[in-house]
Amino acid sequence: MAKGLYHYLAEAWAGARGSWIWDVVMKQRLIEWRREPSIVRVEKPTRINKARQYGYKAKQGIIVVRVRLRRGPFNRRRPNSGRRPKRMGVYGITTSKSLQLIAEERAARKYPNMEVLGSYWVGEDGTYVWYEVILVDPSHPAIRSDPDFSWLVGKEDREGRRRRRLRERQRKLIERLRKRAEQSQQAQSQSS
């Protein structure tokens, strides 16, 4: 079977680090991206194959945002007062969230009326890592009339996608706790 454009793009990005793409194209891009603000709206996605996987369409109501984050460990400053080295609390401090999730949250905070569809890695250097986040406006008429985004329409709330991204186990636990609370309220109302 013949291979399409997206297949070759995926192959190029999979081996981007060791190929000419990184040396010629990406290094120049990273030099420019370092000078830009940490959250930048871009005209079109850098990795079109990944963007299409997450539901990107070149239409009104959908935007792509590039987010820059600091890389590396989150070591704290060493305390002045005395304590044994193990209890200094300097090393081994990591975030409980991945950098990609942090990038999605920052983009969602910058554009509060938009919902996050997905994100993907686009580059990194010694100091920073960049992700592109795809955002969609559920209240836009072009999105409301699109059958591919019917699952998103009508679910606009403050928490947004974060609430819908809870794992299945967490969702079940929350439902179980809710049912218990409702049952206890009903029991109290019946007894009084």
Image (tube, rainbow, N blue to C red):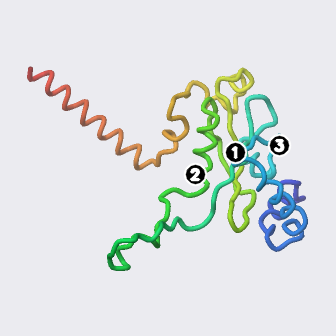
Q: Secondary structure at mark 1?
A: strand
Q: Residue at x 50, y 68 (%)?
A: 75
Residue 11: where, in percent of width, then height? 82, 64
Residue 26 location (% of width, % of height): 84, 62
Q: Quadrant of the C terminus?
A: top left
The location of residue 149, given as percent across then percent down, is 67, 31
Q: Which residue is mark 2?
A: 101
Whether tag 1 and tag 2 are in contact, CB under 8 A, the answer is no
In the orientation shown, which residue stands out farthest toward the front? Answer: 80
Which amino acid lies under the numbered mark 2 shown in the image of this protein? Leu
Camera-nearest label, 1 or 3: 1
**SS label for mark 3:** loop
Q: Disc 1 residue type?
A: Ile
Cα separation between marks 1 and 3: 15 Å
On-image quarter of the N terminus:
bottom right
Q: Residues within 10 Å of mark 3 (few under 14, many from 20)?
A: some
Residue at position x 82%, y 36% in the image: 58
Q: Which residue is mark 3?
A: 44
Three-letter residue code for mark 3: Lys
Q: Dot 1: few (<14), some (14–19), or many (≥20) neighbours within 10 Å?
A: some
